Image (cartoon, helix red, strand yellow):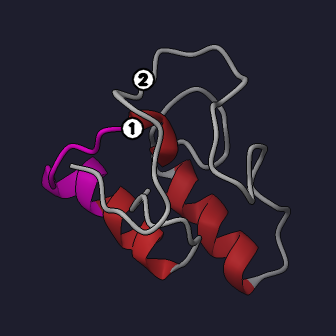
């Protein structure tokens, strides 16, 4: 969700900020969909927390690499995320 190429608590904070506080819109809304259910919702930061702290499943492909989402949905990217660079 942060576009820095690392899955960590910062992604949870970015997702929650976008969902509930109207934080900055990211260049890739699809990056918010960490459970790949086709939407950006509360399930996404929960999925990340489960993965990080409770031995939950890996996020869906293209994780661990950056790349296009193979699931058709309404979430778009203006450009692919670039590891080490924040989108915005």
Q: Residue 38's x, y, as percent? A: 58, 26
Report which residue position mark 1 lands on.
28
User: Vertically, is 54 above or below 50?
Assistant: below
Name which residue lies at 30% across and 39% down.
27
Q: Residue 45's x, y, as percent? A: 51, 61
Q: Residues within 10 Å of mark 2 (few under 14, many from 20)?
A: some
User: Vertically, is 26 above or below 85?
Assistant: above
Relative side of 64 to 45, left or right: right
Q: Residue 58's x, y, as percent? A: 82, 61
- Give the alpha-carbon distance from disc 2 to disc 1, as whole Å: 6 Å
Q: Quadrant of residue 36?
A: top right
Relative side of 26 to 77, left or right: left
Which residues are drawn in magenta? 17-28
Magenta stretch: residue 21 in it?
yes
Question: Which corner quadrant holds the N terminus?
Answer: bottom left
Name which residue lies at 43% across and 69% down.
84
Q: Earlier in the sequence, mark 2 or mark 1?
A: 1
In front of the other: 50 or 77: 77
Q: Residue 33's x, y, as percent? A: 54, 42
In front of the other: 69 or 43: 69
Q: Secondary structure at mark 1?
A: loop
Report which residue position mark 2 lands on.
76
């Amino acid at each position: 969700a942060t576009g820095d190429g690392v899955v960590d608590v910062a992604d949870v904070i970015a997702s929650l900020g976008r969902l509930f506080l109207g934080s900055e819109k990211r260049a890739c809304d699809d990056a918010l969909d960490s459970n790949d259910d086709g939407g950006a919702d509360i399930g996404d930061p929960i999925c990340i927390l489960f993965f990080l702290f409770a031995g939950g499943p890996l996020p869906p492909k293209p994780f661990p690499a950056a790349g296009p989402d193979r699931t058709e949905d309404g979430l778009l990217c203006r450009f692919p995320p670039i590891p080490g660079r924040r989108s915005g």
